Image (cartoon, rainbow, N blue to C red):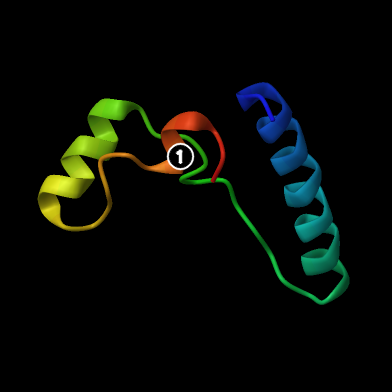
Amino acid sequence: MTLSEKQQLFTVMVANLIHWAEEHGYRLTFGEAYRTPEQAALNAKKGSGITNSLHTRRLA
């Protein structure tokens, strides 16, 4: 599966999660939906993330 196909599948899965959450009274935000590689490296250095975060590939 290509990166683009993974991103497309992830988007559908997120949409399903949002729909489920709304139906069950949860509220969601996208505050940390994407991280630059530089931010991922800083988070890893602080101990609050990992360098090779899926956020940098728009898969988390």
Q: Is residue 30 left or right of residue 40?
A: right
Q: Is residue 48 above or below residue 1?
A: below
Q: Is residue 16 left or right of residue 8?
A: right
Q: Position of residue 22 (x, y in %)?
A: 82, 65
- Residue located at (49% from left, 46% from top): 31
Helix, strand or loop at disc 1? helix
Quarter of the rendering containing residue 20: bottom right
Looking at the image, the residue that sits furthest to the bottom is: 24
Disc 1 crowd, CA 10 A, few/some/many (<14, 14-19, 20+): some
Give percent across and percent down for residue 39.
26, 34
User: Which quadrant does the N terminus fall into?
Assistant: top right
The picture places residue 41, in percent across and down from the top left corner, at: 20, 37
The reply, left or right, for residue 23 in relation to residue 1 is right
The answer to which image quadrant residue 26 occupies is bottom right
Residue at screen point 56% across, 39% down: 59
Residue at coordinates 81% horizontally, 43% vertically from top-left?
A: 12
Number of dots carrying numbers: 1
Nearer to the camera, 48 or 22:
48
Q: Position of residue 13 (x, y in %)?
A: 77, 50
Left or right of 57? Residue 35 is left
The amino acid beneath tag 1 is His
Q: Residue furthest front?
A: 1
For residue 21, what is the image quadrant?
bottom right
Identify the residue at image location x=39%, y=34%: 35
Write down the residue under mark 1: 55
Name the residue nearer the viewer: 14 or 6: 6
